Image (spheres, helix red, strand yellow):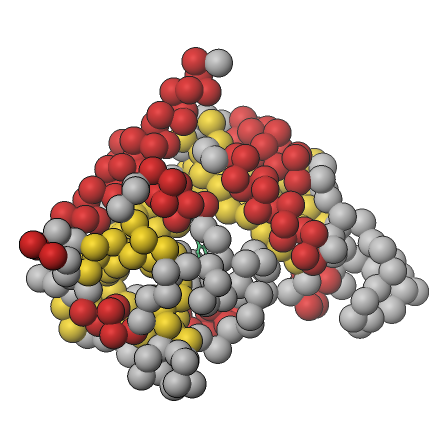
Amino acid sequence: MLVHLNGSHVSRMDARIDPFDRGFIFGDGVYEGLRAFRGCVRSIDRHTRRLRESLASARIDFDADRLGPLSESLLRANGLTDAFIYWQFTRGTPAPGQPVRARVPDALAPTVFGYAMERPPLERCVEPGTTTAAVVEDLRWKRGRVKAISLLGNIMGAMEAKDRGAEDAIFVSPGRSGTMTDGLVGEASATNVLLALPGPGGTPRLVTPDLDSVSILAGVTRDLLLEHQADIEERPVTVDELRRANEIMLCGTNTMVASVLTLDGRPVGDGRVGPVARRLAKSLVEIIGAELDARVAV
Ligand SMILES: Cc1ncc(COP(=O)(O)O)c(C=O)c1O
């Protein structure tokens, strides 16, 4: 595997990062996770925009417009067409003699690291994945829009879920009452959440937490689904609705669409992949397929 490190492609074993790098010492950096199909990076504009916002929030000096060209070059160097691509931008490494624990250091050159790993082709993503989840109180930070590399809060939540026999956490924040009784649903540890609620005449009502009520990431996959599926409502979603949902779905760049089959050990709906999950997974594959076709046509 060839990884990207500060402008060069090197084998993973030869990639050397200084242990005083701020990413290693402080978790001081931001990242992006992208997906390529048929050799093209999908939704590059959305990822570039989000990276630009994360870099600006963290005040890390890197030109986000380089994300696309760097990703394509990494794909080609590894001979990959269908892959997950990860990029990490840390504040950099203080030179010898510079303070190593300054919370706000003098300007440093960022450390840029990227890797690409083979993932299934688009056609295989039409079948939703499956997982199980546990409700976990959201004790993470309040800047969920920033795609920070410091994911300890997410990891601790996922570990708590695992201790309770589930594969993932669905984070819930205290609601208006200040307790979890009217708690608000946020996201899972690496994905956004969508629910199919029982609707009038048996038609499911699709909802996803809005970005103002809870501190969550503006997922690119969530955005794509919202833009193309007119029937998804963005609004505060309560833990009570989560527990009553006929289907719970997770979506993300790596996961695509997955069905949550049990919540806190109890089956969600009939405990199988439901029709809404199938529809969303198919729709996502179509949305991405159309984007790739349009690019080839240019
Ligand atoms: C906490 C969290 N929420 C949501 C997502 C989904 O975002 P995207 O669809 O951009 O991959 C991710 C992806 O890494 C994530 O880490």
The single residue placed furthest to the top in the displayed view is 297
Query: x, y (%) of residue 95?
Result: 87, 58
x, y percentage for residue 132?
25, 65
Q: Is residue 272 left or right of residue 69?
A: left
Q: Is the residue 94 above or below the residue 85 in the image?
A: below
- Left or right of 199 in this view: 29: right
Q: Position of residue 256 (x, y in %)?
A: 34, 45
Which residue is depicted at the point 92% across and 65% down?
97
> Is residue 79 placed above or below 173 in the rendered structure?
above
Write the residue at 21% across / 49% down.
277
Question: Residue 48 appears in which quarter of the rendering?
Answer: top right
Q: Is residue 211 visible?
A: yes
**Where ligand 1 lies, by image quadrant?**
bottom left
Question: Which residue is found at the position 50% from the left and 46% from the top?
Answer: 33
Residue 287 in which image quadrant: top left
Q: How many marks?
A: 0
Which residue is found at the position 35% from the left and 77% from the top? 183
Q: Is residue 41 above or below residue 133?
A: above
Name, please, the residue furthest toward the front.
200
Q: Is residue 88 visible to us here?
A: no
Answer left or right for 47 relative to 281. right
Q: Residue 59: where, in percent of width, then height?
A: 74, 55
The quarter holding residue 172 reads: bottom left
